[in-house]
């Protein structure tokens, strides 16, 4: 089983924790993107990233001095968004790290696909960025089926999707009949409709990875026991491709 998650926009270098163990599988393709991004002016990069001046300046400077083969941080410790805060890999035990190294993969617009201990440098490039270059129409075109082939090359037949639509569609597009693909949906029942709230979804995705690592989950059905952040699995709303977890079922509103 492989678990796929999105990266986060915020990243940092972690100089006080565990060292990187491996090089990203598609570092040469990342290097090609880096060279193109280095050729952009500040204004061009700002437009591509759709961000404010402070973030644009930070990332312009990052790309200008970027060395993918120099000092790196393990990917799982480099990302700094809500999902990663609730996953809390900084306090994992070694057995938890062993679990995610086998099962967890991070989808990336810049690196393609990352194992938790692949060495990365801080960058910003969303999969949906309007990146049109001499060698690709956009990042979906650039990565094509590379990511899916990498996920399944070891015979993996189950993919658990904890990634956003922006990222998971680079996998979903290339699914083959021999692979079972299941998405976890974390929501609330509001006026008889399941509503997903962005912050809670990110929190729950991080907690789900942590739950799976702590319990060494090997069988897909075992994730149905997840009950953190007041989310509970709902058999009546779930099916073979969507596992539904609802928040505050039979409880008062927070």
Image (spheres, rainbow, N blue to C red):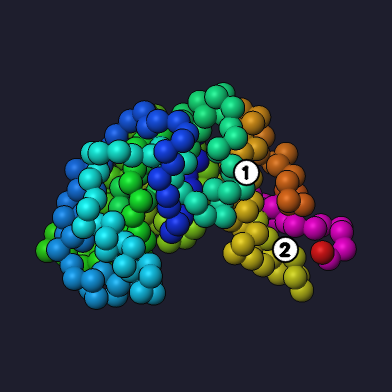
134 or 30, which is in the foreground? 30
Q: CA distance from mark 2 to mark 1?
A: 17 Å
Residue 164 appearing in the image: yes
Left-right relation of 100 to 142: right
Query: For mark 1, does the 10 Å Cα neighbourhood hold few (<14), some (14 to 19), or many (20 or more) residues?
Result: many
Which of the two discs, 2 and 1, sits closer to the camera? Answer: 1
168 or 31, which is in the foreground? 31
Image position of 14 with respect to 245: above or below:
above
Local secondary structure at mark 1: helix
Image position of 230 with respect to 46: above or below:
above
Image position of 35 with respect to 189: above or below:
above
Does residue 210 show up magenta in the picture?
A: no
From the image, tell me which residue sits under label 1. Answer: 208
Q: Which residues are magenta?
A: 234-253
Q: Name the quarter where the C terminus is drawn.
A: bottom right
Q: Quadrant of residue 210?
A: top right
Query: For mark 2, does the 10 Å Cα neighbourhood hold few (<14), some (14 to 19), or many (20 or more) residues?
Result: many
Q: Earlier in the sequence, mark 2 or mark 1?
A: 2
Does residue 242 show up magenta in the picture?
A: yes
| Residue 188: assigned label | 2
Q: Quadrant of residue 195?
A: bottom right
49 or 59, which is in the foreground? 59
Local secondary structure at mark 2: strand
Q: Residue at x 23, y 45 (%)?
A: 67
Q: Are marks 2 and 1 in contact (CB under 8 Å)?
A: no
Q: Residue at x 47, y 34 (%)?
A: 17
Residue 227 position within the rendered picture, expressed as x and y whole percent measured from the top left: 74, 44
Left-right relation of 149 to 180: left
Residue 134 position within the rendered picture, expressed as x and y whole percent measured from the top left: 12, 63
Left-right relation of 33 to 228: left
Residue 68 position within the rendered picture, expressed as x and y whole percent measured from the top left: 25, 43
């Amino acid at each position: 089983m492989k678990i796929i998650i999105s990266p986060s926009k915020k990243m940092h270098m972690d100089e006080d924790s565990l060292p990187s163990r491996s090089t990203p599988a598609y570092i040469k393709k990342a290097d090609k993107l880096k060279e193109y991004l280095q050729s952009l002016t500040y204004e061009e990069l700002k437009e591509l990233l759709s961000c404010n001046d402070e973030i644009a300046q930070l990332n312009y400077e990052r790309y200008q001095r970027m060395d993918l083969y120099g000092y790196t941080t393990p990917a799982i410790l480099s990302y700094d968004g809500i999902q990663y805060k609730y996953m809390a890999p900084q306090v994992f035990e070694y057995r938890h790290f062993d679990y995610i190294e086998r099962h967890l993969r991070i989808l990336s617009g810049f690196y393609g696909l990352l194992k938790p201990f692949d060495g990365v440098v801080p960058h910003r490039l969303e999969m949906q960025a309007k990146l049109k270059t001499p060698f690709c129409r956009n990042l979906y075109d650039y990565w094509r089926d590379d990511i899916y082939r990498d996920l399944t090359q070891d015979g993996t037949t189950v993919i658990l999707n904890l990634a956003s639509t922006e990222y998971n569609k680079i996998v979903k597009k290339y699914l083959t009949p021999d692979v079972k693909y299941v998405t976890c949906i974390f929501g609330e029942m509001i006026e008889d409709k399941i509503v997903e709230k962005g912050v809670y979804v990110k929190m729950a995705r991080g907690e789900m990875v942590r739950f799976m690592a702590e319990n060494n989950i090997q069988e897909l059905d075992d994730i149905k026991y997840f009950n953190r952040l007041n989310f509970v699995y709902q058999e009546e709303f779930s099916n073979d491709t969507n596992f539904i977890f609802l928040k505050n079922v039979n409880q008062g509103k927070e």
